[in-house]
Image (tube, rainbow, N blue to C red):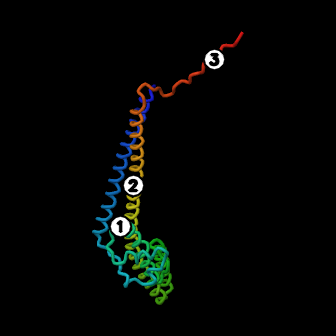
């Protein structure tokens, strides 16, 4: 095979690979753009605004290591995935924790409150069976508090779940954007290599073989 033919084949193959990489990069970039626009439109439509800095308590901003994001986004309209994560993990979660403490069930969640309510209902039944109206009234009061808290927890967990799902969707979009950038970079490298291959093909003598056979030096005759 001639060297020029081999160069043209390799350069043409490299060019095809570069085109494919560009196509894949464009496809991923469209997914990235869609996710960013979709997240912004859907979150913006909810009109959720972060509390301004002067309305935030020290407890809210220092509750967990990531709580400082509430200061970063203070007063802003929620429109991005990271904002949704911040609001769900550090604002809603903190207020749900405070509600549980205020209701007398610190650390309670929607799931655990089901068991608590069942136990309180049993306590009421037992107290009534004994004729202990005071104990029954106390248990009923706790049951009402647990029921109200469970409704609050359900609402809070639902909103948290939705916001964190949006955040996850935005992360996938960001990954698609990063992959798109990497593919564009690889495509640029392949285009450069293909161009170099074409240039080399046309500066190489047309009849030059790929591997020129080694020419052995003529042997001197052995004297008799």
The Cα atoms of the two marked residues, 3 and 1, are separated by 81 Å
Mark 1 crowdedness (10 Å alpha carbons): few <14, some 14-19, many ≥20: many
- Farthest bottom residue in view: 134
- Farthest right residue in view: 224
Q: Position of residue 50 (x, y in %)?
A: 35, 76
Foreground residue among 58 and 215: 215
The residue positioned 42% from the left and 30% from the top of the image is: 4
User: Which residue in the protein does label 2 denote?
Assistant: 176
Which is more N-terminal, label 3 or label 2?
2
The Cα atoms of the two marked residues, 2 and 1, are separated by 16 Å
User: Which residue in the protein does label 3 denote?
Assistant: 219
Q: Position of residue 29 (x, y in %)?
A: 35, 53
Figure check: 102 above or below 204: below
Q: Position of residue 159 (x, y in %)?
A: 37, 70
The residue positioned 34% from the left and 50% from the top of the image is: 26
- Farthest front residue in view: 223
Res 80 label: 1
The quarter of the rendered structure image containing the C terminus is top right
The residue positioned 39% from the left and 53% from the top of the image is: 181
Q: Quadrant of residue 222?
A: top right
Relative to 200, 211 lies left or right:
right
Foreground residue among 74 and 102: 74
The Cα atoms of the two marked residues, 2 and 3, are separated by 66 Å
Mark 3 crowdedness (10 Å alpha carbons): few <14, some 14-19, many ≥20: few
- Farthest top residue in view: 224
Mark 2 crowdedness (10 Å alpha carbons): few <14, some 14-19, many ≥20: many
Which is more N-terminal, label 1 or label 2?
1
């Amino acid at each position: 095979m001639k060297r020029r033919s081999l160069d043209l084949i390799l350069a043409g193959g490299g060019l095809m690979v570069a085109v494919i990489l560009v196509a894949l990069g464009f496809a991923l970039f469209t997914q990235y753009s869609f996710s960013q626009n979709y997240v912004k439109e859907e979150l913006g439509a909810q009109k959720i605004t972060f509390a301004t800095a002067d309305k935030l308590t020290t407890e809210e901003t220092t509750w967990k290591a990531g709580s400082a994001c509430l200061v970063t986004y203070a007063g802003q309209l929620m429109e991005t995935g990271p904002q949704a994560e911040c609001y769900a993990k550090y604002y809603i979660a903190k207020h749900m924790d405070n509600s549980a403490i205020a209701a007398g069930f610190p650390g309670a969640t929607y799931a655990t409150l089901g068991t608590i309510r069942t136990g309180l209902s049993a306590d009421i039944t037992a107290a009534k069976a004994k004729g202990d109206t005071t104990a029954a009234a106390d248990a009923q009061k706790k049951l009402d508090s647990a029921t109200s808290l469970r409704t609050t927890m359900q609402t809070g967990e639902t909103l948290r779940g939705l916001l964190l799902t949006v955040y996850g969707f935005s992360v996938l979009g960001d990954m698609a954007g990063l992959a798109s950038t990497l593919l564009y970079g690889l495509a640029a490298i392949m285009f450069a290599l293909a161009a170099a291959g074409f240039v080399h093909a046309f500066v190489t003598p047309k009849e030059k073989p790929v591997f020129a056979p080694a020419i052995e030096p003529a042997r001197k005759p052995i004297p008799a």
